[in-house]
Image (tube, helix red, strand yellow):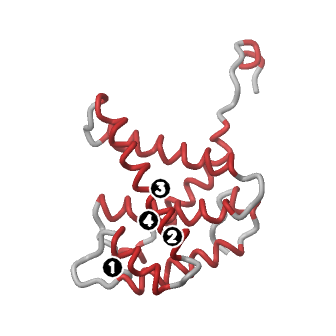
Amino acid sequence: MSFIDRLLGRTPDAREAMRPLWHATVVAARDPLWYRELGVADTVEGRFDMITLALALVLLRLEREPDQGDAAVRLTELFVDDMDAQLRQSGVGDLVVGKHVGQLMATLGGRLGALREAIPIGESAVAPAVERNVSLLDGAEAGPLASALLKLHAAWGQIPLDAMLAGRLQQ
C-alpha cells in the first residue's frame, strides 16, 4: 500500500486476492468441451449457465474448508461485479440492473443448492438438476454433462486449497 493510500485511509480491495480464482472459474466455464461435446447451448444463457455451474462447484469446494467463508463471499462479489458490468454493457439501464443482478444471484443460489443436494447422490440426481438448470441444445441429454460435472467436482476436490485460491484449477 502506498503512502498516499495510507494517508487517505484507502485499503486494498479484499476481493483482489480472489480474482485469479474468479478468472480461472470463468476460463473453465468457457471451455469449448461444454458446448461442442456436452450439449450446452453456446448462447448467452448457456454461457451464464456454465459460469454459475463452475462457480457453484468452486463454492462447494470452499465450503469443505474451515475458515473459507470470506473467500467464498469475495468470489461471489466478483461474480456480482462481473454480471453487473455485463448487464450494463448489454444495455440494461441503471434503474433495473440491481433487480437483474438479484435474479442472477437467486439463480446461482438455486444451482448451488441443487448441486449441494445432488452431488452426494451421483449422476442419477445431478442429471435432472442439469436438465432443469442448463440451456441444452435440442436433442442433447443431460447425463454426459452431469457426468462431466461430477468428474470436475472430484478433480477440483483434489486440488490443494492454496493452489485453488491462486486460480490453479488444472491438475
Crowding at label 4, few (<14), some or many (≥20) Cα neighbours within 10 Å?
Answer: some
Q: How far apart in space, not on screen, are marks 4 and 2 (Cα)?
A: 19 Å
Whether tag 2 and tag 3 are in contact, CB under 8 A, the answer is no
Q: Which residue is mark 2?
A: 115
Crowding at label 2, few (<14), some or many (≥20) Cα neighbours within 10 Å?
Answer: many
Sequence-wise, the earlier of marks 3 and 1 is 1
Q: Quadrant of residue 84?
A: top left
Dot 2: element: helix
Q: Nearer the viewer, mark 4 or mark 2?
A: 2
Residue drawn at x 47%, y 68% as measured from the top left: 114
Whether tag 4 and tag 3 are in contact, CB under 8 A, the answer is no
Residue drawn at x 36%, y 68% as measured from the top left: 133
Sequence-wise, the earlier of marks 4 and 2 is 4
Q: Residue 30, labelled with which disc?
A: 4
Q: Which residue is mark 3?
A: 109
Q: How far apart in space, not on screen, are marks 2 and 3 (Cα)?
A: 10 Å
Q: Amino acid at mark 3?
A: Gly
- Give left or right: position of 126 versus 8: left
Picture quarter with the N terminus:
top right
Residue 124 sits above or below residue 13 on the image: below
